[in-house]
Image (cartoon, rainbow, N blue to C red):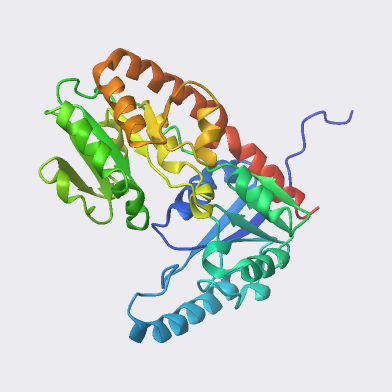
Amino acid sequence: MASTDPVAPAPLAVAAFTGGADVPSARFRVRQYVPALRAAGIDVLELPSRAGAYPPPERSRRALWVVRNLLSRLVDLARARRVAVTLLQREFLSTTVTLEPLTARPRILDVDDAIWVYGGENFARRLARRCDLVLCGNGFLADHFARVHDRVELVPTAVDTDRFLPGPVRPCEDAPIVGWSGTGSTLPYLESIERPLGEVLRLHPRATLRVVCDRAPDLPSLRGRVEFVPWSAKTEVGAIQGMTVGLMPLDDSIAARGKCSLKMLLSMACGRPVVVSPVGANRDVLACGEVGFGALSDDDWVGALDTLLRQPRRADELGARGRAVVESRFSVHALAPRLAALLRAVVS
C-alpha cells in the first residue's frame, strides 16, 4: 500500500548577504526568520558585511573601506558558491553595483527602504533587473519596483512576537514614558517634533521622553526630561515594554514613504499604543485596527499624547488591539510560511 504521509520538501540552501550584524533589515527581515525557515527545510547562511553598509564620513578612509568591503565580499562569494538561492539586501557598496552579478542565481533583492533616493533611479533599476524576484517591505516600494521588474512580492517587515511581547509590569501611570526607538540616522524625524513633545512634557510634569538609540538625540529644549538609553539587543525589548506610548514621526518624503513601520510595530508588539505620522506604511498599519493615533500637525501630536497619558485604560485597550494586529499580520509566525513559499518558488 502506498504511503499517505506528506512528502517533506527538499532541503533548500539560501545565502543572505546583509548589511551588518546590527542593521535592522538584517535582524528583522533575515535573521529572525532563520529558525522558522529551518523548520520548513530551508537553511539560511547569513553573510553580514564586515565593513559596514555605508562608507565612513571621512573621505580619507573611504578608499580603504571600499577595498576592505570588496575583499570581504569575495570571501563571502566563495562560501556561498553552492547555494540554491541568493538573497541580496541592498548593494555591497553603497549606491553602486559591483560584485552582485557574481552571486549564484536565482537572486532575490529584498528592499525595505527607498534605495533609489540615495543611489539614483538608474542604480536601483540595474540592481533589481539583475535579480529574479524583488521582495518589498511595503506597498509604496512594491509599486515603485513593479515599474521596472515583472516579479515583485510584498512581504512586510515582521516582528518576533515571542520576543517582543507585553512586559510583566505595566508602565507606571504616575510617571509615564513617551518612547522612541531607532537608529541614529532616523533621529531627525524625532527631533522634528521637539516642540509638541515639549508641550506634552509641560502638561505632564512627571512624564519622560525615552530615546533608545545608538547615539543621543539633539533636543536642547527638553534637557532634563530625556532619558537616553543606549541601544543593545539585550535591553531593547525591556526598554520598549516600559514605555507608555510609542512614537514614530516621519515627514512626507519619498524616503519616509519607503519606511516599513518597524518602530511602530515593535511598540504594538509590546502592547503599547502608538502615535505616528500617517505616512506610507504607517497609514496602512493604522488602517488595520484601532491601535493609536495618526498625527499630522503639532496640535495633533499634543492632543493624541495628552489623551493617552490622561486615559491609561484607553491606552491599554489600544495597546492590546495593536498586539493582536501584529500577531495576525506582521509576526514571524504569520509571515514565515509566505517567505518560505517565495524562496521555493523562485527556484521552480
Q: Looking at the image, which residue is at 17% across and 43% down?
A: 226
Q: Nearer the viewer, residue 100 or 136?
A: 136
Q: Looking at the image, which residue is at 66% across and 48% down?
A: 142
* Residue sitting farthest toward the left: 224
Q: Quadrant of residue 51?
A: bottom left
Image-based side of 59 in relation to 290, left or right: left
Q: Looking at the image, which residue is at 53% across and 53% down?
A: 254
Q: Quadrant of residue 65?
A: bottom left
Location of residue 151 in the rendering, given as x and y in whole percent from the top left corner: 76, 53
Q: Nearer the viewer, residue 248 or 230?
A: 248
Location of residue 322 in the rendering, given as x and y in whole percent from the top left corner: 45, 25
Q: Establish if 325 lies above or below 317.
A: below
Image-based side of 151 in relation to 36, left or right: right
Answer whether residue 72 is visible to the viewer in this image: yes
Q: Establish if 221 lies above or below 325.
A: below
Q: Establish if 166 lies above or below 71.
A: above
Q: Looking at the image, which residue is at 45% across and 51% down?
A: 27
Location of residue 334 in the rendering, given as x and y in whole percent from the top left corner: 58, 32
Q: Nearer the viewer, residue 52 or 140?
A: 140
Q: Quadrant of the N terminus?
A: top right
* Residue sitting farthest toward the top: 313
Q: Quadrant of residue 98?
A: bottom right
Answer whether residue 330 is visible to the viewer in this image: no
Location of residue 329 in the rendering, given as x and y in whole percent from the top left corner: 57, 30
Total marks in image: 0
